[in-house]
Image (spheres, rainbow, N blue to C red):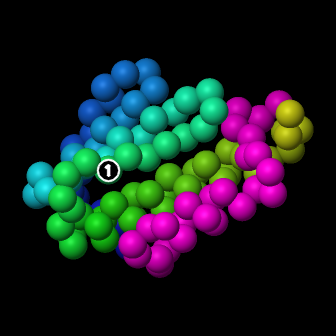
């Protein structure tokens, strides 16, 4: 289940922010990379197609974050991204998405 071609327009608004605008202009989200974490903010009144496509994109983003934080032979202290606490943050974030991972 991948996004339909042309569904999203990406705009890197700064070195740490990526804005994603949906084709029906009902809503958009921004991914912000910061020293203390990664945040996603939604703007607008999302349509149902937007919500479904947003979930597809964000599940992929969470997969990449998990890969960076957990995979490979790199010591935890030397990784580009480290998870605090029990490491459940990625699964907790998945639980907030409107559609479950396919």
Where residue 74 appears, as percent x and y from the top left, is 84, 39
Label 1 Cα crowd, 10 Å radius (few <14 / some 14-19 / many 20+): some
Q: Residue furthest top?
A: 15
Residue 71 seen in this snapshot: no
Q: Is residue 18 above or below residue 84?
A: above
Q: Secondary structure at mark 1?
A: strand
Q: Is residue 42 left or right of residue 74?
A: left
Residue under the image location 77 percent in, 35 percent down: 79
Q: Position of residue 89 (x, y in %)?
A: 66, 57
Q: Please state which of residues 44 and 24 is positioned toward the viewer in this rendering.
A: 44
Which of the 4 quarters of the picture holds residue 47? bottom left
Q: Which residues are magenta?
A: 78-102
Residue 26, x across and y down, in percent = 14, 56
Looking at the figure, which quarter contains the N terminus? bottom left
**Vertical position of residue 12 compared to residue 5: above or below:** above
Residue 27 percent location from the top left of the image: 20, 53
* Residue found at x 85% / y 40%: 76
Q: Is residue 56 above or below residue 66?
A: below
Q: Is residue 2 left or right of residue 5?
A: right
Residue 34 shown in magenta: no
Residue on which the image places disc 1 = 42
Instruction: Between residue 63 and residue 43, name the one nearer to us.
Output: 43
Q: Residue furthest left?
A: 24
Name the side, left or right, on which 61 lies relative to 23.
right
Q: Residue at x 25, y 48 (%)?
A: 43
Is 88 colored magenta in this rendering?
yes
Q: Does 16 sit left or right of 77 as displayed?
A: left
Residue at 49% from the left image edge and 62% from the top image edge: 59
Question: Main structural element of the magenta stretch: helix, strand or loop?
Answer: loop
- Is residue 41 in view? yes
């Amino acid at each position: 289940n991948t996004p339909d071609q042309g569904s999203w327009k990406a705009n890197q608004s700064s070195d740490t922010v990526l804005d994603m605008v949906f084709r029906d202009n009902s809503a958009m989200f921004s991914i912000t990379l910061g020293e203390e974490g990664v945040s996603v903010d939604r703007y607008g009144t999302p349509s149902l197609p937007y919500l479904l496509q947003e979930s597809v994109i964000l599940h992929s983003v969470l997969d990449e974050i998990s890969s960076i934080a957990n995979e490979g032979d790199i010591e935890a202290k030397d990784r580009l991204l480290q998870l605090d606490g029990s490491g459940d943050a990625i699964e907790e974030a998945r639980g907030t998405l409107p559609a479950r991972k396919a």
